[in-house]
Every structure is written in C-alpha cells, then in structure tokens.
C-alpha cells in the first residue's frame, strides 16, 4: 500500500538476448537483508516489497561473468527499472558496473514526486510539519490546519481536501471526519514521502491523491541524533507594523532525539542482519503573548450614567410619530441617566466579572500568554524470520495541550487536549519465488476535548435569565453577551466538545510474477466509528446592538438584546459503525523491454453508516413528511437527544418511521455499482527518455 518499492529489470547477454534462469540477489546495504530471485523465461526479474533505502544488485549465471551493480537509491512506492547486461566468462570472474544516471520512472504511468530525507531535514520548516514540503509538488496546496486536531489539510490538483489520502507505513491515517492527516510524525522519523497525484494503481483508492510516508527503520549501524531549536522575541525581527520598541514575548522550544540500530540483548540475542529498531521523540513548548485592547464603559456608564455623551432614549416611551406615519418617537432618559431601579438584575450580575479601563484612552489592555505543549514519538521494529517471512510494525503517538486565552481575565479562555495514535503491522510471506503475500493491520484513534473558562458554574441561571434550566444544566458556564463596540463575553459556542474516533483496517494482497506480467490482487476491509458531544449554544448567546436606546451598553444594562439564541446541547451522537469492503486486480504487463502497460480494476462496497442511538432523519417537503430512523418494528428513539422529547409533539403528524418506507436506520439504499477501472502506460522511446 504505497510505501514499499520494487526493483525490476531485464537481464541480457552481449547480443541483447534475454537470459532466463539467472540468479539475482538484491541486498540492502544498510541492513544486510538479502532478497534472491531468478529471471523468468523472458529474462525479467522482479524483487517486491522493498523498504526505501540503498540496494546493490548481483547477477550470476553459468557461462557469464558475475555482475555487480553499485547501490541504487530506492524511493518510497517506486518501481525501479534496472536492466543489466552480462559478459561472457566464468562465474568466478566478476564485473562491476559503473555508477549510472538516476533511475527514471519507466514501469508505471503513476504521476508523482518523492521528497527525500535530505530535503525534509535541510529545508526550513515553520513548526517542523513535513506536509509543507508537499506543496513543492505541482498542483499541491495547503488547506491550513484544523484547529480541533491540530492537523494539516492538503488539496492536490484542485480536488477537495477530503480526496487526499495520507498514509504512514502503508496504513491510512486520513481523518474521515475532518479531512486531515490524523497523525504527522516528527520529520526526524521520516525516511521519505511521496505525493502521487494521478493514475495510480488499482490497489489504491479512496481519493484523488496519495501522500505516502515511510518511517525510518534501524540498520546494522547504531545511530542517533539530538536537536534543539530555540526562538524568542530577542531573535525575531520587529514586525513592520509595530512602531513601538517593545516586541511581544515569544518563547518557542522544539527539541528531541532519535535512536536506531540492530536489536541486541547481550548474551541473549544479536539482531544484526535480522532485527532492527528505530525510535524518536519530539517536544514543543510555545508561549506566545497575545494582545487585546478593547473599549470598555466608564465607571459612570457601568452605573447607567451617560451624562456628557450622546443622548440615550427610553424604550418604554416609544409611541407613533404623528408627523411621520410608520415611524416612532422615544424620549431621552432625564439627565441621560438610567434610573437604578431600571437596571436589569441579569446585567448587574455580570458587572463584577467585567473589567474596568486600565488605559488613559478608556480601553482594557490584556496581554495573556497562549501556550502549546506537544509531545510526540514514533517506534518502528523490523524483523526477518527467514528468507520467506518478514515482519514490520510501527506505532506513533502525539499529545497536545493548548490554552487560548480570552480578552479578559474571567471569560473566553479555552483549554484543548488532543491525543492522536496510530499502529500498523505488516507480514510479508514468500509463497514461492514468483508469488508473495502481504498482510496488513492498521489502527488509528484520535481524541480531543476542549473546555471553556468558567465551566461548572451556571452563570446563565444564576443571573436570572429565564428558560435555561434544562438546556444549560449539562454544560453550565457563561452565556455569550455580545455588546457592539465594547468588550464582550465570549459564548464559547459548542464548547466543551468531546470527540473520539477509531479506524480499523485489514488488508491482504498477493503478487504473482507470471512471465511478462506482474499481477496483484487483494482486499481491503475498514471499520470506522465516532462519538461526540458538545454544548452547542445551551448557555445562551445574546447580542446587544443599541437598537432600543441608541447605545449597545445601555441596551445591555436594561436587559434588551437585539437577538438571542438558545439551543439544546448535543447529547451523545456519531457513527456507530461504517464498513467499507474494497477489492482490486492489477496487471503490469511488460509488452516489450521499452513498453509497460498498467491495467487494473477496483470495486468498492461502501456500506451506509449506522448512527449512535439511531439518530437519522430526512425531510421530504414535497410529500410533507419527515422520515426518522427506526428499528424493524417502527420504533423511533426520541430520547437520544434532549430536544427530541420537545420536537416530537410538534411534528408527530408528519413523522414517518423509516421501516414504513422500506429503509433501514441509515435512510439510504446501498450502492453496489462502484467499479473503478484503471489504465496507464510507461514507454521508453529511447534510453534515458520515458
């Protein structure tokens, strides 16, 4: 699955005639792992499922001198074509081929590009995010970072971000919920990655582009590294628009280490040429000052005294204007002061939380720190049981804790905790020299939880705002109080949010070398589930605009919002399970030494999702009915959400159970016609051109 490569080619004699039965040995120069094959009747050889790395090739055949090809670099997902010509002589004699030009893509019509380890480590990256380098590939652009998962999003060739598949060590790490890369390993853990943007094999589906990452593996040589990157305001250039001599505080540290080599247990086990490990750790600590400088009412205005300011009108005096039909008149408050008895108790409740001006211009200046603490690590183990069986497994985990402050001490801050994990395992078994089976397991889990400042105290109810006892009880806190032109209370809508998802994958494929054909077929099974809750706007969200008095602050003091929003919280909902079953067949046919035809077909059976508590509904305005998910007996679960018990009596005359219209709880009919044919070719009109 897009992370291993293969080396293939034609062995010929000095006259250009193919040489069948030649022994070809391909050896990883870093690990010493050796793979042996024999050329077929057409003289072709193919060595499959090779990890990215450097490989030397040795060819032997009775009647010819042994030939050695210096190490070539094999990239992730590459099919390297290496043709070799044997010289007549004794096997005891050997010929070493001089280094040649870099290998061209001559065996596949796939369009893509590989970003190697040197570029990954040497090019400057803000935040050490490898996906920034993917934008070096024509047609690839960044879609930013998802704030919930702190994860990058990419779009290739104009396709939607959700059509880009991210893979690590052959397993998908794409978030089906957020259309991002769920897990992004440290750049020090990445051997290389490829961006495939068109015409890829039928083995790969789910999207229009594939970003495949291969993690580093250990070698026979112990190796390690350590690093520290420091950034602070003393080293930063002054912002062009900052005319003061003060630079906002920034303290950013990124540090980590790597270690790899053979697994050696003194006096117990020596894993040289057989068992290898690689591990890494990366930490990030960021403290960055934020700045807010917002107008707040004066001390007199907090008590309703607007004397010396524009007149505020008394909404209780509204009456029709006899001189202007359709218009209204309102009298100003005497002395431009709101009587104390007219101040709304709900507004007065929030005054102790609301800051007073701390600048000469009547604003409240606030400069808290935004913090980020991230810890991530990766571990990979490679083991060769014997020549016919190899095993590889890797695990990645990242934990991020962030705090985003509000615009004043008491309100608006949000804490976010994110944990992302992935695990993959692959076993490669050589059934016979021309047939290899690859089995894979994959698992990805993400979880995040954000919590607003003030959660736990029901300020909405305590202030006396009516109608929120039921809605706000699950996630009590501050309501939103938007006061146009003045510092406001952030509603932190939909916070807290609790979310988690799981993705399980099983893949199995067989590769069969049959003459000039490299045939591959297999299956891919996936299960996906999610669960989430959030507060929505259950604490209330009110806007004061000055519509009633001419000043938003006086509207607030009188308790007269221009608009208000109230919802029930989102109780537990999500995808109970979603199954995908995919099958493929691919034939890479070497029609001639210069022409390879890639033909394949993929079939995808994507089952409809089933929701937690059977919470699905679909409105049909033409037939004036709302189809709601039900069980086979027509029973509807109205208790999955708090709002359900209130909505059902209002719409019971138009609600129809899904079983009555012949649908299950998914409210969809399964589409069984998803065939995806693939075709491509690679042609070398002359040597060096493809």
Image (cartoon, helix red, strand yellow):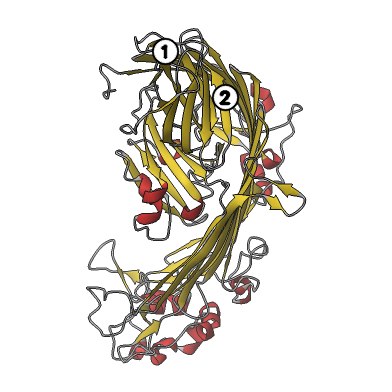
Which image quarter: residue 337? bottom left
Camera-side residue: 178 or 536? 178
The quarter of the image holding the C terminus is top left
Residue 569 in the figure: left or right of residue 153: right
How far apart are the alpha carbons under marks 2 and 1? 21 Å
Mark 2 vs mark 1, foreground winner is 2
Quadrant of residue 527 within the rendered picture = top right
Q: Residues within 10 Å of mark 2 (few under 14, many from 20)?
A: some
**Residue 578 shows up from this direction:** no
Please tell me which residue lies in front, 562 or 586: 586
Provide residue 364's location: percent of width, then percent of height: 39, 84
In the rendered view, would you say 230 is above or below 143? below
Q: Secondary structure at mark 1?
A: strand
Residue toward you, 203 or 686: 686
Q: Position of residue 511 (x, y in %)?
A: 57, 19
- Seen from the viewer's position, the closer of residues 544 and 260 is 260
The residue identified by callout 2 is 36
Do we see residue 455 in this rendering? yes
Q: Which residue is mark 1?
A: 590
In the image, is residue 168 above or below residue 294? above
Does dot 2 land on a helix, a strand or a loop? strand
């Amino acid at each position: 699955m897009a992370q291993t490569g293969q080396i293939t080619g034609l062995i010929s004699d000095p006259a250009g005639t193919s040489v069948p039965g030649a022994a070809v040995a391909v050896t990883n120069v870093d690990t010493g792992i050796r793979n042996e094959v024999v050329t077929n009747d057409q003289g072709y050889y193919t060595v499959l499922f090779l990890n990215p790395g450097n490989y030397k090739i040795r060819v032997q055949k009775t009647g010819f001198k042994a030939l050695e090809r210096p190490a070539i670099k094999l990239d992730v997902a590459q099919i390297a074509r290496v043709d070799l010509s044997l010289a007549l002589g004794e096997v005891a004699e050997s010929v070493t081929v001089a280094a040649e030009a870099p290998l061209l893509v001559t065996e596949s019509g796939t369009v893509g590009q590989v970003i190697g380890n040197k570029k990954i480590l040497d090019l400057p990256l803000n935040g050490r995010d490898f996906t920034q380098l993917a934008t070096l590939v024509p047609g690839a652009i960044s879609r930013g970072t998802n704030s919930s998962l702190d994860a990058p999003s990419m779009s290739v060739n104009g396709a939607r971000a959700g059509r880009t598949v991210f893979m690590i060590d052959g397993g998908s790490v794409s978030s089906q919920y957020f259309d991002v890369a769920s897990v992004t390993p440290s750049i020090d853990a990445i051997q290389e990655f490829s961006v495939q943007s068109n015409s890829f094999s039928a083995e790969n589906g789910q999207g229009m582009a594939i970003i495949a990452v291969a993690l580093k593996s250990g070698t026979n040589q112990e190796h390690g590294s350590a690093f520290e990157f420091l950034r602070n305001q003393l080293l930063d250039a002054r912002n062009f628009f900052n005319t003061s001599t003060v630079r906002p505080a920034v303290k950013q540290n990124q540090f980590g280490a790597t270690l790899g080599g053979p697994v050696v247990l003194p006096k117990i086990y020596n894993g040289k040429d057989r068992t290898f490990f690689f591990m890494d750790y990366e930490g990030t600590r960021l403290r960055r000052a934020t700045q807010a400088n917002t107008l707040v009412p004066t001390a007199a205005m907090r008590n309703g005294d607007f004397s010396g300011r524009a007149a505020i009108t008394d909404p209780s005096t509204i009456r029709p204007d006899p001189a202007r039909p359709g218009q209204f008149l309102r009298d100003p408050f005497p002395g431009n002061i709101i009587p104390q008895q007219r101040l709304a108790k709900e507004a007065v409740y929030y005054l102790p939380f609301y800051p007073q001006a701390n600048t000469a211009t009547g604003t409240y200046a606030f400069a808290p720190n935004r913090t980020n603490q991230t810890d991530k690590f990766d571990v990979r183990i490679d083991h060769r049981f014997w020549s016919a069986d190899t095993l590889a497994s890797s695990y990645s985990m990242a934990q991020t804790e962030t705090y985003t402050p509000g615009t004043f001490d008491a309100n608006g801050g949000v804490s976010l905790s994110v944990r992302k994990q992935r695990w993959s395992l692959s076993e490669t078994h050589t059934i016979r020299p021309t047939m290899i089976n690859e089995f894979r397991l994959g698992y990805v889990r993400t979880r995040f939880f954000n919590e607003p400042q003030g959660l736990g105290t029901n300020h909405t109810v305590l202030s006396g705002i009516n109608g929120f006892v039921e809605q706000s009880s699950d996630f009590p806190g501050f309501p939103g109080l938007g006061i146009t032109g003045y510092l406001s209370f952030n509603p932190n809508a939909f916070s807290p949010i609790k979310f988690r998802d799981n993705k399980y994958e099983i893949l199995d494929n067989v590769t069969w070398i049959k003459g000039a054909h490299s045939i591959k077929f297999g299956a891919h099974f996936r299960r996906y589930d999610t669960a989430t809750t959030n507060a929505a706007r259950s604490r209330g969200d009110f806007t004061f605009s000055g519509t009633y008095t001419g000043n938003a602050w006086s509207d607030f003091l009188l308790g007269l919002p221009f608009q208000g929003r109230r919802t029930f919280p989102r109780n537990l909902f999500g995808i109970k399970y979603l199954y995908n079953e995919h099958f493929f067949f691919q034939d890479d046919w070497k029609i001639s030494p210069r022409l390879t035809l890639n033909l394949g077909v993929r079939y995808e059976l994507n089952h409809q999702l089933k929701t937690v508590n059977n919470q699905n509904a679909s409105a049909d305005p033409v037939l004036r009915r709302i189809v709601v998910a039900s069980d086979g007996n027509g029973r509807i679960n109205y208790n999955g959400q708090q709002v359900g018990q209130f909505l059902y009596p209002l719409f019971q005359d138009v609600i129809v159970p899904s079983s009555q219209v012949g649908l299950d709880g998914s409210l969809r009919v399964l589409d069984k016609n998803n065939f995806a044919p693939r075709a491509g070719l690679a042609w070398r009109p002359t040597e060096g051109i493809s």
